[in-house]
Every structure is written in C-alpha cells, then in structure tokens.
C-alpha cells in the first residue's frame, strides 16, 4: 500500500502537468527507494506486530496500540525511504522529489491508526482472546481431583489379599473391602481363577467370571 501511495504521489502529478522529463526522472529515482520501503515494511511488520501483541496482552487500549503500531511502522519505512532516496538523488538537482512523498507519509501516519493498523490490531487481539480461552479450557479440564475423588481412588488401589479354602483348592482374592466384591481379582492355586461358583464357607459362595468376582452369596459386609 505504501508502495502505491509513493508512486501515485510522485508520478501522477507529473503526468497531469505534462512533465515528461520529470516523470522519467521520478520513475528512475523511485526504484531503489520503493524497494527499500517494501523490504523495510516486511521486516518492521513482524517486530511491530510482536510489540502490539505484547501491549494488547497487557490490556492496553486498542486504539492506543493501533496508533503506536501504525506510527512506528510508517516512521521506520519512510525514514529508510528518504535515506535511500537521498543517497541516489544527491547531486542530481532533483530535490523537488523530496517533498512529494511527504504527502503519502502524512496520509499514512494519519489514516493507518483508524484503518489498516486498527484492523491488524483487532485481529491480534482476537487471537490473544482465543488463545486465553483455550488455556482456560485446558486448565478447567486438568483441575486437581477433589478430596472425595482422591479417597475413592485410594480405596480402589489399597487391595488386600484374602485366602479361602474351597473344594478346588486355595482361592486368593484381592479385595477392596473386608469381603469379596464385584471386580475383585481372583486366583485359584496361583493362576487366574476360571469362571465358576466357588464355595468358600458353610453358606458362602463366590461367583467368578474370567478371573474376576462378579457376585457373592452368604457374606455380610462388616466394613464400618
């Protein structure tokens, strides 16, 4: 955009007034300054964007950040433009071209905070807001467990082995509570207990499916 402002600010007035020599002179003088303007714009855009993002993340006013962002970029690119123009135009008697780009520079500094600069800052602020929202969601998903959840998890991890004598041999059950309960692991004679109904007391039975208790009969829960 600054490239076109620069060209229109110089070449269009010369064309309208019929100054063919001035037009040709302007075209030759503006090649390197315009290239330097574009290159410096691409470089400063990244640094200014980081600076704007840091300020917006700190909660600074959007319009204030847009103004600082736009003024910084325009100041840098037009300073470099004039330095390059001065280098190539020295001793050519074309100092008149030094004044014409001022129009584009002033317009850019005045309008950018309300137009392109403001739009870019809005996009940056939106990305910061979305990133903060994602972080909040991640934090909410990774909240530490409550005391009740910790107690429940601990009770499931603290298993006690109880040995019962049955007709098939020695039945060992890893119990969460004082009596066999659902999903307790069961081992018969050192191996995973096969599916069956095991009599472990006068009127006590343990029903096992594929090595895990799924029901009991005749037990009383003595856990307090």
Image (cartoon, rainbow, N blue to C red):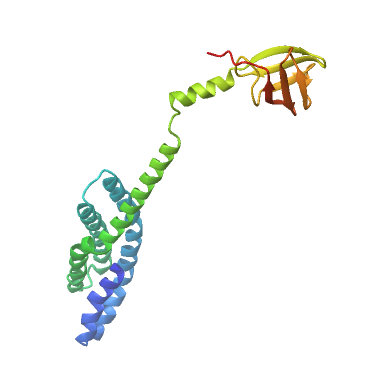
Q: Quadrant of residue 33?
A: bottom left
Q: Which residue is drawn at 43% across and 27% down?
A: 146
Measured from the top left, where is residue 129 in percent x and y?
33, 49
Q: In which quarter of the image is residue 120?
A: bottom left
Quadrant in the picture for the N terminus: bottom left
Q: Which residue is drawn at 65% across and 16% down?
A: 219
Measured from the top left, where is residue 82 in percent x and y?
24, 63
Would you say 97 lies left or right of 176 here? left
Measured from the top left, where is residue 156 in percent x and y?
57, 22
Asked if 209 appears above or below 29 in the picture, the reply is: above
| 180, 13: nearer the viewer | 180
| 118, 214: nearer the viewer | 214
Measured from the top left, where is residue 171 in percent x and y?
75, 16
Would you say 39 lies left or right of 111 here? right
- Do we see residue 125 in this rendering? yes
Q: Which residue is drawn at 61% across and 14% down?
A: 178
Which residue, as the protein is rendered here, is positioned at the far bottom? 18
Asked if 110 appears above or below 26 in the picture, the reply is: above
Asked if 219 appears above or below 47 in the picture, the reply is: above
| 72, 120: nearer the viewer | 120
- Do we see residue 80 in this rendering? no
Asked if 12 appears above or below 56 in the picture, the reply is: below
Q: How many marks?
A: 0
| 171, 21: nearer the viewer | 171
């Amino acid at each position: 955009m600054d490239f076109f402002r620069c060209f229109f600010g110089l070449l269009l007035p010369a064309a309208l007034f019929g100054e063919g020599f001035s037009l040709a002179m302007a075209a030759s003088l503006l090649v390197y300054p315009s290239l330097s303007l574009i290159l410096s714009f691409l470089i400063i855009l990244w640094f200014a964007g980081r600076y704007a993002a840091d300020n917006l993340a700190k909660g600074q006013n959007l319009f204030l950040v847009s103004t600082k962002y736009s003024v910084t970029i325009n100041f840098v690119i037009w300073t470099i433009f004039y330095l390059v123009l001065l280098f190539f135009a020295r001793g050519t008697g074309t100092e008149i071209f030094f004044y014409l780009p001022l129009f584009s520079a002033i317009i850019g500094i005045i309008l950018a905070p309300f137009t392109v600069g403001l739009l870019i800052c809005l996009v940056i602020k939106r990305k910061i807001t979305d990133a903060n929202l994602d972080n909040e969601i991640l934090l909410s998903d990774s909240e530490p467990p409550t005391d009740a959840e910790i107690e429940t998890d601990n009770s499931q991890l603290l298993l006690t082995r109880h040995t019962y004598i049955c007709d098939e041999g020695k039945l060992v059950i890893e119990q969460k509570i004082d009596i066999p309960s659902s999903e307790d692991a069961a081992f018969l004679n050192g191996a995973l207990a096969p599916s069956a109904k095991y009599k472990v007391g006068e009127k006590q039975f343990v029903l096992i499916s594929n090595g895990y208790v799924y029901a009991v009969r005749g037990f009383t829960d003595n856990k307090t």
